[in-house]
Amino acid sequence: MKTLKTLALVAGTLFTGSAFSAQMVCDIYPKSGGHSWGNGTANCSAIDFSFGNSTSGRFYIKNITKQVEEVRWSGIANCSGGTSCGVTIRAYSPNNTASALILYKDGTWERTNTAQADYETGH
């Protein structure tokens, strides 16, 4: 009986740790005269006519309901910790994506969705 309770506790922890509540979203900051759409959602985009090859942006996690111990970023978000990560968004790149593994102080964890940032420069 004790073994069964232990197994149930371990299984419950594993399944609880992967439940979704936090959400990865993005913002793009186009250069002067540019426009952005979808900031604060999982699919943001922007266009300007700078004819450059990048602009600034950020990926961040919203709807966190527990105290965070650590955030492990992936994709173009190469930050160490924190719930927000400033990035360089490359024009016309399919690789402007980010997600994260959130480790909570109560010992559970959660993997976020993947957010996508699209940027065009007018050429």
Image (tube, helix red, strand yellow):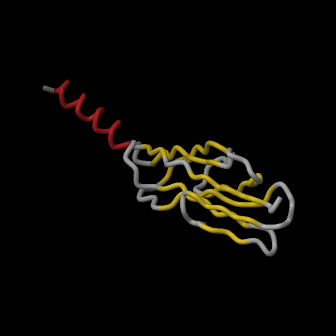
Front residue of 107/71: it is 71
The residue lying at 70 percent from left, 60 percent from top is 57
- The residue shown at (62%, 56%) is 59
Q: Residue furthest front?
A: 123
Q: Is residue 1 above or below residue 54?
A: above
Which corner quadrant of the image does residue 122 belong to?
Answer: bottom right
Quadrant where the N terminus sits is: top left
Q: Measuring from the top left, give residue 114's x and y in whole percent.
A: 54, 48
Q: Position of residue 68 (x, y in %)?
A: 49, 52
Residue located farthest toward the left when viewing the structure as drawn: 1
Q: Is residue 28 left or right of residue 11?
A: right
**Residue 74 picture location, percent across and down:** 62, 42
**Which residue is the extreme one toward the right?**
51
Number of residue marks: 0
Quadrant the C terminus occupies: bottom right
Which residue appears at 61% of the width and 48% of the height? 98
Q: At 64% from the left edge and 43% from the top edge, which residue is drawn?
A: 75
Viewer-nearest residue: 110 or 114: 114
Residue 21 as seen in the image, left or right of residue 83: left
The spot of residue 61 in percent (x, y) is 54, 57
* Closer to us: 33 or 58: 33
